[in-house]
Amino acid sequence: MNNISTVAEKPKIYWEPNEYHHVPYQIYSDGGIYEEEQKRLFRGPVWQFVGLDMEVPNPGDFKTTWIGDTPILLIRDETGALNAFVNRCAHRGTTLCFEAYGNKPVLSCVYHNWCFDLQGNLQSVAFQHGIRKQGGLPKDFCFKDHGLTRLRVAQVRNLVFATFSDETPPIEEFLGETMVSHMNRIFNRPMKILGTYSQYMHNNWKLYMENVKDSYHASLLHLFFTTFRLNRLSMEGGLLLDDSGGHHISYSKVKTDSSQDTEYETGQLRAQQDDFTLADRRLLRTFPEFEDGITHAIQGIFPTMVVQQIQNSLAVRQLVPRGPGECELFWTILGYEDDTPDQTDMRLKQSNLIGPAGLVSMEDGIIGSLVQRAIDCDSDKSTVLEMGGHSVENQKSRVSEASVRGFWKAYRTHMDL
Ligand code: FES
Ligand SMILES: [Fe+2]
């Protein structure tokens, strides 16, 4: 018999060392790179966002999700603790929970009915002792050795993260002070989920994360933003990066006023296209929310998470790769428990405007595939990321690609490329 096991070779890639302002097209389509990402990023020493604690409020409540290609089960046990497991039976590998959300007192597998408790321990095996002293498990079978594959779990406010690796530093260290304080700013009191949906994209997952970190495109690709002055690069704002470069916050300020006579209320906001007005002006109603006056803050957490404040539209987004050329983005739309019905209404209208069925994320959803379809044929060529220079550091201007370069700095570090 041939020995078919081989030592995996590192994918060959032509990339100048420490260069972050050019990215080889190969990185967006190479199957070997994708495999390596599963090992080094998604199952490596990196925290991965898996959900919000209020998605699973009670013992037995679970949510199914993914970290990279790996199916994950987030479940609350009887003690109130959150546990994360690979969503796979320890017997022959069947998916344990199929639903997006649910509640189970015990995790039983549909195939042969092995049962696991909410801490992932194997509790019982059907026909363990066989029938009439025939069959069954051997006497030395150890239940303790056949629990579910468990991940480490950490939480910042409502945000739950998991990691496969024992090497991953504590979550606060991984995120850095600036990122944690921004999470504290948004998740500053009890929140509630207003809705969820997902958006499927025909592009490599990194093209979407670049888009999130690219403040330069916002007023160019998203003409609605500029036409109605919701976000222009001339507004006060900037970019904040963590030390690794992988996390960022892009922020800006637009004046908001809840009175009936604001420019938004009257729909007078127009750019050059003077004939553009809104038929229903309620779409743009906003209310002032944060004392620091910041009205737009997009936080990108390496590798695949986004915390969104676009005026009063609050959301978290979790990106899941679906192979080298596809990905799926899961949105959770948020409000505060103490919101008035009118505030909830404004948040929902703004979220519809921002979401993929509206006028902003629809464009972010297609732009990645417009890149992907044009670059796959030329893997030896590369992108240009020189807006704002070549550095990876905080910027006072959003006319910069520093946070995109930061993503590649962290990526190269983790991937050892
Ligand atoms: S695969 Fe789950 S019990 Fe057999
Ligand atoms: Fe965008």
Image: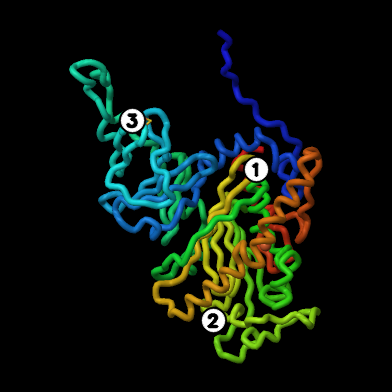
**Badge 3 residue CB within 8 Å of ligand 1:** yes
Q: Picture coordinates of residue 113 (x, y %)?
A: 31, 33
The residue sitting at 64% across, 51% down in the picture is 201
- Of the numbered discs in the image, which one, if any, rests on residue 108? none
The amino acid type of the residue labelled 1 equals: Arg
- Please name whichever residue, 270 or 349, is drawn nearer the observer in this view of the structure: 349
* Colour pattern of the rendering: rainbow
Give the mark nearest the N terminus, 2 or 3.
3
Q: Picture coordinates of residue 284 (x, y %)?
A: 61, 79
Question: Within the image, what quadrant is residue 33 found in?
Answer: top right
Which quarter holds ligand 1?
top left
Q: How far apart, in angstroms, are the residues tagged by discs 1 and 3?
A: 43 Å
The residue sitting at 56% across, 38% down in the picture is 38
Q: From where the camera sits, is residue 400 visible?
A: yes
The amino acid type of the residue labelled 2 equals: Phe
Q: Give the secondary structure at mark 2.
A: loop
Location of mark 1 (residue): 412
Location of mark 3 (residue): 112
Q: Picture coordinates of residue 108 (x, y %)?
A: 32, 38
The residue sitting at 58% across, 69% down in the picture is 352
Relative side of 294 to 14, left or right = left
Q: Give the secondary structure at mark 1.
A: helix
